[in-house]
Amino acid sequence: MKVVLASKNKHKLVEISQITEKFDMQLVLESELGVDIDVEETGTTFEENSFLKANAVMQATGLPALADDSGIAVDALNGEPGIYSARYGFDESLDDAGRVRLLLKNMENVPDDKRQAKFVCVITLVTPDGKTIQARGEVHGFVTHAPAGDGGFGYDPIFYYPPFGKTLAEVPQEEKNQVSHRAEALKIFYEKLKEAGYAEQ
């Protein structure tokens, strides 16, 4: 099944493709189809924003569209940055490293035992025939005091995952893909695909 990934993020394409290969799903970026949509993420949850993105790209391309809305939610910051993870600080000059520095600065007085956080990912598939399939995955860990590792992307360098004893940026992509929030969401998503008849049982 050919599916458009409602994203311009090549990192996401690589990571999701590595997991969806076994679904018999061919993912393409919207840009490969000449589509360039900036969807206004007006939702208040990962679920709502994931649907908004998938639905807009499905309507623009006429193909099934897959969207991922994800972010980091930090307990000590009342769940922030959450759905605003990619726009944290609302400063367009900030890149991933800049947003990481901002998060660490906002947590500089938070003690070790209060630095719990989770990565959340919601995957949504919207099809031209009106079907919506959605799944949520989470991975729990802690925010470190400084970045470690040069793998992954986004907030991976400051997300310490206890079973690994490392940040998600310090492990090979294959290991991260076994436990990440995106991997968890995709596992649940695959089961829902099978139930809906879009993947082999």
Image (tube, grey):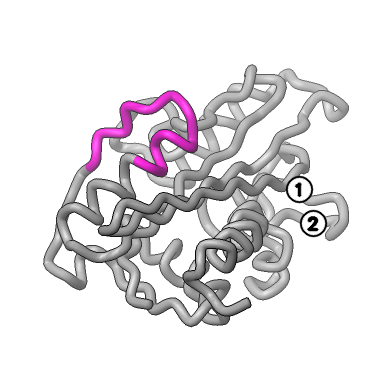
Name the residue carrying label 2. 166
Instruction: Kindly identify the residue that appears in the image at 54 percent across and 36 percent down.
Output: 101
Is mark 1 in CB contact (under 8 Å) with mark 2? yes
User: Which amino acid type corresponds to the residue marked 1 in the rendered image?
Assistant: Tyr
Q: Give the spatial CA distance, label 1 vs label 2.
A: 5 Å
Screen quadrant of the N terminus: bottom left
Q: Is residue 127 magenta?
A: no
**Residue 116 placement, left or right of 187:** right
Is residue 160 among what the camera can see?
yes
Which region of the structure is painted magenta?
Answer: 39-51
Instruction: Kindly identify the residue that appears in the image at 48 percent across and 82 percent down.
Output: 24
Q: Nearer the viewer, residue 200 or 80?
A: 200
Q: Nearer the viewer, residue 125 or 178?
A: 125
User: Which amino acid type corresponds to the residue marked 2 in the rendered image?
Assistant: Lys
Instruction: Kindly identify the residue that appears in the image at 71 percent across and 67 percent down.
Output: 178
Q: Which quarter of the figure has residue 177?
A: bottom right
